[in-house]
Amino acid sequence: MEQIDHVVFYEKPFLKFDRLLETYLSFAPSGFGSFLRAMPQWLKQKLHLPREIKKGLPGRWKKPLIFTKHHESHAASAFFPSPFEEAAILTMDGVGEWDTATIGVGHSNQVELVKSLQFPHSLGLLYSAFTYFCGFKVNSGEYKLMGLAPYGKPVYRDQILEHLIDLKEDGSFAINLEYFNYCQGLTMTNHRFANFFGGPPRKTEEKITEREIDLAASIQAVTEEIVIKMAKFAREETGQLNLCLSGGVALNCVANGKLLAKKVFENIWIQPSSGDAGGALGAALFTNFQLLKRERVVNKNDSMKGSHLGPRFENEEISEFLKETKAPSHHFSDEDELLYKVCDAIEKEKIIGWFQGRMEFGPRALGGRSIIGDARSENIQTQMNLSIKYRESFRPFAPSVLEEKTAEYFDLKVPSPYMLLVAPVKEAIRTALSTEDQESMTDPDLLKRVRLKRSSLPAITHIDYSARIQSVSENRNDRYYRLIKKLEQKTGSGVIVNTSFNVRGEPIVSTPQDAYSCFMATEMDLLVLENHILYKSEQPSSNKVSKDSHISQFSLD
């Protein structure tokens, strides 16, 4: 602890409490139940964060505690790691203290926020309201809504823009609170919202109907429109050529891809951990540069180091773990031999748990803690969703592609190292749908729509011929790059399926123990722990973990 100079928290609790009190008073007596639930935690703990933080630190902390504003933290996380000397900054999320979106400018080692949109008018909360209504978990299931959207049509777009929000040309908007309940209640939407859209919210795990599919498409279309308008206004206000994005809404990679295609800015950089975890990073960066005025050296390569900022485990530690666990494995001192074995398994449509180097910081698996397979397989998507991830069949998987080959497969001319851009697959690799296939596109059974082959890379091609791309380079991704390069040499394909190493509801695995437990609870075929390969068929039955007992440890997302 003597090496630590400052402890910094990513928002100001008193300002947040001010917003909560003012909101409850504005809606009183409605919302009294929500007020009673919230106040004990605030009065006991959240209002006393300096005390709580000091209690959590070893020894007696006598140095400063710093509290940055929520959107200052997001802005700092967006700009300071970026490859730009100066840039416009756009942050969008649910809500911080009062702000829900901000426009700012970054110069050298300083950021300044110049415009803001304030609670209760929030793009993040608007999207979360539809997430809730469609039966997914708020602050967790928004990416499901984004993945569901391409299956539907934006038939409710005009109704949303006419009745639910008043959208202006600069991207600002006012939400019609008559349809929402998040200010004062325990739900995101109310009975008026339900009546407007033809019935009550879908219950979690109920069958997804065409209504939910079209609602997802509609709110996604509205979100894209708002993001583009906000970005255009940011360009006009700041005059900058480069844009940095952060906040939870910046994880909407479909909107990011549409924004990139519009060429509002010459260059866009998105913080890979754009949610509140990235806010913690931003708070530290804000303190370092903005407050302490330390020199910022712009790194044109990658200040985030591929977002591989987490723990790593040496082969010796892994060997010791495997010995203790009595888990049979094969050790390869020669990397070429290891990669050849893995490529051979990929070619045979095996599903592989890939555990290499440092763990990723943020919500995307980027080749450190990934489950991988052959993007050319017609069976991998369904198999991974239902037998490995134990999640909804409609959810798409991302491709990891050699950075230098990205333009051969996708309509994308810039790197996408953090899986934060969606782009179309090239016409040249698309597969024309037969008349029978086109009829299946409206089948109520989503699984039938998912299984339609749309390209020569069916495992990663979404229903609208798009893909959420991770471009992989050797300086950023190390052995993961060399694996894909070896696969290309062997098969001619420089693309693999990449999804996070976990089951539904589980955090991405961190340790060898986490990885082995997940491996043994699913139908993965191989586990690669650094230089060790484990085959499921060789594992003792005593090490088998039941799917139910493994999943029961986690809350479904």
Image (cartoon, grey):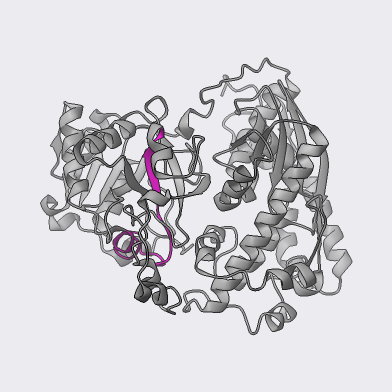
**Quarter of the figure that contains the N terminus:** top right
Q: Is residue 5 left or right of residue 28?
A: left
At horizontal 60% and vertical 63% (from top left) the residue drawn is 138
Q: Position of residue 274 (x, y in %)?
A: 60, 43
Q: Nearer the viewer, residue 234 or 102?
A: 234
Percent position of residue 456, x then y: 31, 53
400 inside magenta stretch: yes
Please determine whether, in this image, residue 407 is positioned above or below residue 536.
above
Q: Nearer the viewer, residue 313 or 272?
A: 272
- Decide which of 21, 199 is in the foreground and name it: 199
Give the x, y percent position of residue 201.
Answer: 61, 78
Q: Is residue 372 left or right of residue 277?
A: left
Residue bounds of the magenta highlight:
381-403
Q: Residue at x 64, y 41 (%)?
A: 246
- The answer to whether one can see residue 45 in this image is no
Please state which of residues 365 and 181 is positioned toward the viewer in this rendering: 365
For image coordinates 51% across by 62% down, the residue present is 144
- Residue 130 among those drawn in magenta: no
Q: Residue at x 75, y 71 (%)?
A: 180
Left/right placement of residue 198 relative to residue 43 reads left
Name the quadrant containing residue 546. bottom left
Would you say 51 lies left or right of 315 here? right
x, y percent for residue 496? 32, 45
